[in-house]
Amino acid sequence: MAQVVESIVNSTVGDAKKRQMDGFTIEQNNKTPLTTYFGTKIAETDISLRAGARGPTLLEDFHNREKISHFDHERIPERVVHARGAGAFGEFKLHTPLTGLTTAKILTDTSKTTPAYVRFSTVGGSRGSADSVRDPRGFAARFYTDEGNWDLVGNNIPVFFIQDAIKFPDLIHAVKPEPHNEIPQAQTAHDNAWDFMGLHPQSTHMQQWAMSDRAIPRSFRHMQGFGVHTFRLLNAEGKSTFVKYHWTPHLGTHSLVWDEALKLAGQDPDFHRRDLWDAIEAGAYPKWELGVQIVKEEDEHKFDFDLLDSTKLIPEDEVPVQNIGTLTLNRNPVDYFAEVEQVAFCTQHIVPGMDFTDDPLLAGRNFSYQDTQISRLGVNFGDIPVNRPVCPFMTNQRDGQGTMFSKTNRTAYHPNRFDTLPTTEPAKGGFKSYPEVVSGIKERMHGPKFNEFTSQAQLFYNSMSEPEKKNIISAYQFELSKCYETIVQQNAIDRINLIDHDLALSVAEALKDVTVKDAVPNHGKKSAYLSLVEGKNQTFTANGRKVGIYLLPGYSYAQVEPLKVALAAAGMMVKFVGPATGKVEAGNGMTQVAEFTFENSRSTHFDALIFIGGDSDDYPKKLKNGRLIHAAREAYMHLKAIAATGNAVGWLTDLALPGDLPSDAKAKTEITQANGVLLAPSVGTGAEFSTQFINSVAKHRVWDREVDHIAA
């Protein structure tokens, strides 16, 4: 009965998880006086108790001891991997049920809105590393379902470096900072990482993804997610169906460019977590579609790869992704440590109607995740509010550090004379594992299809657009130039040559001591879905983009206000940049409030830039500012949409970007568009200008812009 009531309440009055978390949220304000942990009100917390003004500090000062002692122990071990992260709460709404394939209510009941939580993360860096490093990203989703927590813990890349969890310590030891000097932080651009990858053929496919723009996402909001493994769905008759999970962002899958990523690591190391927080606070809630690839069990062996191999994906050209539900993140954490640092995901957390496959990497994760959470948070980590399910939960576990409940049960074992905590038969919702037929000789080996490592790496590279291939070449050159042992570079080039001979030749141009062996045939196959630039089903929208509008005192208010309204109507976030924060006065006395200054921000903070002209003829003189010129050139180099209005057009064409834009544009009456730059000297900012600019921003980058000559 309690579950029925909870289900009804949750679907009608809001988020069950939020209501539960509210019970563990303490309001602190000027009406809640400072006390000790046990309630004694404190009169002085700035000076310790002393024997005389200049005498020794006294041990009897219990407040001092409690305060310092707690501080000494307020850190917990950080995650070995995925230490750097950000999280948010939200909800999941199923719209297309998987009826007949599973009994899991979250995948069959479209009337239910399920509380959800997602933690995004980088993999290799420490908690203090930067957000914009080249690295796979974790995409860990939790559903607080009526049947228990379901943790779908994956990455923004659908494949992984290794096939078997026994290799995971080797991988992480290799990619972490080198042990003799703890350098470099959050990078694979060093000898140990490429020594491992060059000698370990299983990593061949993942290398391509990691060297592509996928490894430097524009934001968490513009990032895909994948369950990586093949899982099982079980229906009421116990029939199994294989499934792979995909998260597709409503805003499209888009990335930074490398120079932009490098600069952001220094300018704003919190760029991704800040973007997520700001978007949710602004009501621009990030959304993803949950998609599934379904494979009947009888079709398991029809592919030229093994479904249990986590270094392989199922090409969407062969098995389409079916979208079944929408995830919306709409609530930021109240306390980062309590709700993000202490969230504890486990891949083994599934609900009835689901099960695992024999993927050897998944088997290791199912052990490792539980084990590492105990190391970080203690054996009772499930009692921490962010980790609790919203459905009733009862176990026979007892004691242990951090026990949160007093339990009336005197018989913490099964069976017992009172039938306390009875089991539940599968027909009534109890979990039942898939009765898989197992046979074979006990041995250390994989299935035969696990031993092919280059076919999908070739498929990925062949599917890239020319700009993406150029970026992959540059990424390899950067990474391998940071390796100082020739044997490491040579092994890496040998591995790259197995993917594509021309790729290896291009990368080797930056490495004078390596040789490229004879070409290995490339099968030439492509997928229509893998490119971020030309990929089928890729989304291009201006919605959710941040636009920086640059103003100086005396700007033309008439050029700003209609543009501001049009951009906001398109779902874009408009940010004004001025010489100082606060009000910037226009030529007519009206004002706009600048959130950023020329000095405290860079073009990298925005997806697109607009430079507004002024009402007076001498206004362009004010634009002769090094920060403004640099912003224009840097955004141009990063292939972003740029616009100028009024007499700022001449400044942009003649001073900021001379030679790249038509100089006569400032004398025209119509709008000029050149190299992805919109110039409106006299048309102002009417509907045509706004429409053209919004369409330009929606394309994400001006991929055909030539920028090799630009240094900014």
Image (tube, helix red, strand yellow):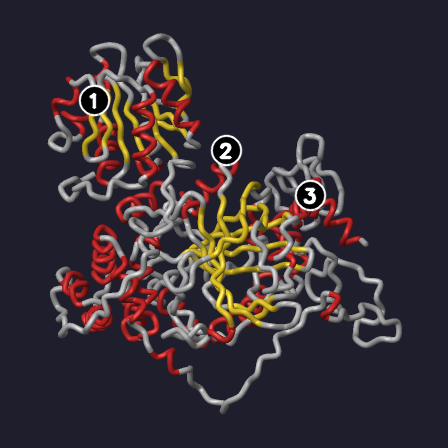
Outermost residue to the right = 418
Q: Is residue 31 above or below residue 492?
A: above
Q: Amino acid at mark 2?
A: Ala
Residue 402 position, x and y percent, is 69, 60
The local crowd at label 2, few if under 14, some if 14 to 19, many if 20 or more residues have their Cα within 10 Å, is few
Q: Residues at badges 3 and 1 in contact (C-beta under 8 Å)?
A: no
Q: Residues at badges 2 and 3 in contact (C-beta under 8 Å)?
A: no
| Residue that mark 1 sits on | 649
The local crowd at label 3, few if under 14, some if 14 to 19, many if 20 or more residues have their Cα within 10 Å, is few
Residue 160 position, x and y percent, is 40, 66
Tell me which label, 2 or 3, sits earlier in the chain.
3
| Residue that mark 2 sits on | 282
Q: Distance from label 2 to label 3 (Cα)?
A: 22 Å
Q: Is residue 703 above or below residue 143?
A: above
> Which label is found at residue 22?
3
- Quadrant of the image for the C terminus? top left
